[in-house]
Image: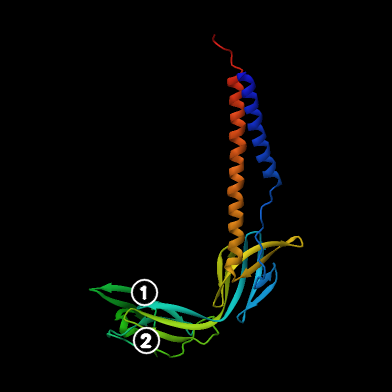
Amino acid sequence: MQRRAAAVSVVVFLLLAAGAYTFIGAAQQPDVTLEDPDYTVSADKTLTVAGTSYSFTEVSDGSATAEWTNESARYTESWSANDTVVYQGDDYSVVIPNQTEPTEFELREVQTVDRPTVEQNGTTYVIVEEDGERRLVERDEYLDDPVVHNFAEGDAIERPNNDNETRVASVTNSSVTIEWFAPRTNEVSFSQGENTTLGDTAYLAHFEQQDGSTVLQLTTDYEDYHSDVDAQQEFHERTNGLWGIVILSTLAAALLSMLAFMPSRY
């Protein structure tokens, strides 16, 4: 009698497991689709948003990369006091006056000595030989006065290998900043479900298969996207619950079978 009851229970559990498993196999996960995306683009295509053109170098499953050019990007170069810089083909030292708020600076020629030198009592001397006689001349007396160029904030200044108009942007007690404007290529990336700003607008990215290739869709309708994501999440939760029924029912049926056919002690 007990074995008959156990057999009935085993059949019930197996039916539960089979029904849950069948339902899992028949169920279809809902897709994430955008009803009316703002933009759809594929690899090697160009998308213009708010007057800026974006060239897509990559569009793959879940990520994309595009490049755009800022035609007037700001570039800067900073010189610290006493740095050596090249100006008009020669080396110059950056000299900043000792003032509270300086607005000017100098480029002073870096001079070199073409003869041997010697240090005596903290003074540098140049060894000069004339008519077989050797004498020492202080370095400052031996060299001509250095060439000095004066600049103030806003002045134009030439830079090697730079054809753009370059100006002195600012002068402080410790450094000089120069600036120029030129094109700069920037990169922007997109990821599934993430926001990326183009122009002044943040767009949510979604990737979809169309005609055998991956396309990127951009939308500002976040509710449309997130409602489909929520539906997928609910689907996974219910599927996990059904798998739990399959596993527990199968284990219960196996356990009842083992217990029912165990030999009796009496």
Question: Quick check: 76 left or right of 213?
Answer: left
Q: Position of residue 168 (x, y in %)?
A: 43, 86
Asked where in the image residue 264 lies, by quadrant, the reply is top right
Residue matched to label 1:
116
Residue 110 appearing in the image: no
Q: Position of residue 158 (x, y in %)?
A: 49, 86
- Crowding near pointer 1: few (<14 within 10 Å), some, many (20+)? few
Q: Position of residue 28 (x, y in %)?
A: 69, 51
Mark 1 or mark 2: whose residue is earlier in sequence: 2
Residue nearest the observer in this picture, 182 or 166: 182
Instruction: Identify the amino acid type marked 1.
Output: Pro
Number of marks? 2
Q: Residue at x 58, y 34 (%)?
A: 248
Residue matched to label 2:
106
Q: Residue at x 59, y 77 (%)?
A: 69
Question: Quick check: 209 left or right of 157?
Answer: right
- Crowding near pointer 2: few (<14 within 10 Å), some, many (20+)? some
Q: Position of residue 93 (x, y in %)?
A: 38, 80
Q: Quadrant of the C terminus?
A: top right
Question: Quick check: 92 left or right of 36?
Answer: left
Element at badge 2?
A: strand
